[in-house]
Amino acid sequence: MADLLITNGTVIALDPERRIIADGAVAIEGDRIVAVGPSDEVTRNHPARETLDARGMAIMPGFVDAHAHAGHGLIKTLGGGKSDPWYRACQGGYTVGSTPEFWYAEAQLAALERLRFGVTTGVSLLGGGDSVMRTDRAEYGDAHMEGVLGIGTRSVVAVGATRPPHPLTYASWNGSARTDYPVTFDDQFATCRTLIDRWHRTHEDRLHVALLTPTLHQAHLDAPGAEDAIAQSRKVKRLAEERGLVFTQDGHTRGSVRIAHDIGILGPRTLLSHATGLDEDEIAICAETGTCIVHNPSAVAAILARCPVTELLDAGVTVAIGSDATAPDRSGDMFRHMQQCMHYHRTHFHDPSWLPPGKALEMCTIDAARVLGLDHEIGSLEPGKKADVILVDLRRPHLYPAHMPEFRVTYFANGNDVHTVLVGGKVLLSDRNPLYVDQDAVLDAAQREAELMIDRLDLRDGLETPRMFWGHSRDLDLIE
């Protein structure tokens, strides 16, 4: 007997046949899907202890956000969109300005945002990714993991070392008392090992650990410490291979893929984020090595140079969509990023035929699961897979008339249309309300920890409305 039967909805399965079942159902036993098909057939063959009526809704696999940053949720718009103060806030917040309580509160906030938007699995880099990671001590990663667990979603947490030279200065806090200490690459590497041993594939397989090294550009190879940077990248990649982990890098652009190839860190378990400005040779390298790409169409990096997604797809490279959330100007709403992705590439070609909506939907479900090596478990509605399911309310003015639901959920829906979310067969969100977490408590804790971090680093001026916010066609302060 099934534990739960979801009936009477429009199933958009993202299975190998890409079935769309007008009056469909999904049967769940434990944490797994056991049947997907027409409602009358599934109901007849799988009597259930509980039934969930999805009439007027799309039944879909949960979204997979292939790239975002832990910590960003409590920094968001600091600096008013200006890159330099924003990066300074990240640098300070992720090294000397944060506490375990900060990382717990931010993890809860980000995971709750994902839950509300139907993102059942998300990648979170434990810090600024390419520039700075909070891996000086395991207590910060522990706090992040505990925060995600309290919400109930799945998370792939990427940890690694910051770019040389080392040592770097980090700090801990006891009330208002700050203690600085030096941190070496070996310290960070040991922390990563501890977090892998403690958290990878734990808690019903909801938590995974990935490994990260800074992306190297030619300027880094020409600078002192280049040999150390290369050796450290190779060491982290070897550990990822030994432990069967995803290996990722953030901020690839204009020649950095070629450098990564020369270093020997590409391959089927390597996931490169942004990947803008790639030339034909770099596209071919990704295809030949099986390296995967995560495209962040809403990110500032995508404005500065184009990620050649369509060319990568035509070369046979698997490409996923990431939110790069949650700051400085983007949320974790994958509907938004699908729509941005389609318009981004159509505008480039001046041609609306590029990136059909079905491909965009694949890029944040089954393809995103594939780049994480999890497509055998999540990313589609198929018997045997984890029951990560979302119900999207189609009875909304902006989603009517009720034709071609596969178009409506990609072109017109948004994260607030997500009605119900299940992770591993457990209903975590119902009628847009989280069932197992006090949302107000999460918001209050996030506000409190953000205020404390801002005061520790004296960042109040970063909260002022920018001088050219109103009445100008361009904010020239952003390019100073």
Image (spheres, helix red, strand yellow):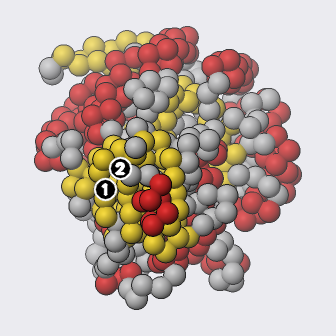
Q: Can residue 325 be seen in this view?
A: no
Q: Within 10 angstroms of label 1, few (less than 14), some, or many (20 or more) residues?
A: some
Name the residue beneath numbered marker 2.
48
Could you say which quadrant of the image residue 98 lies in? top left
Q: Whole-percent x and y of residue 94?
A: 38, 31
- Vertical relation: 336 (above or below) 382: below
Regarding mark 2 in the picture, which secondary structure is present there? strand
- Vertical relation: 368 (above or below) 172: below
Q: Nearer the viewer, residue 153 or 463?
A: 153
Residue at image location 55% in from the left, 48% down from the top = 383
Q: Nearer the viewer, residue 449 or 384?
A: 384
Could you say which quadrant of the image residue 214 lies in? top right
Q: Nearer the viewer, residue 380 or 184?
A: 380
Regarding mark 1 in the picture, which secondary structure is present there? strand
- Foreground mark, 2 or 1, reads 2
Residue at image location 82% in from the left, 40% down from the top = 289
Q: Is residue 211 visible?
A: yes
| Cα distance between the residues tagged 2 and 1 | 7 Å
- Vertical relation: 472 (above or below) 231: below
| Residue type, label 1 | Thr
The image's mark for residue 51 is 1
- Vertical relation: 253 (above or below) 162: below
Residue at image location 58% in from the left, 60% down from the top = 14
Q: In this view, does 214 lie to the left or right of 190?
A: right
The image's mark for residue 348 is none
Q: Within 10 angstroms of label 2, few (less than 14), some, or many (20 or more) residues?
A: some
Q: Whole-percent x and y of residue 286?
A: 79, 46
Q: Is residue 96 left or right of residue 365?
A: left
Q: Whole-percent x and y of residue 108?
A: 28, 39
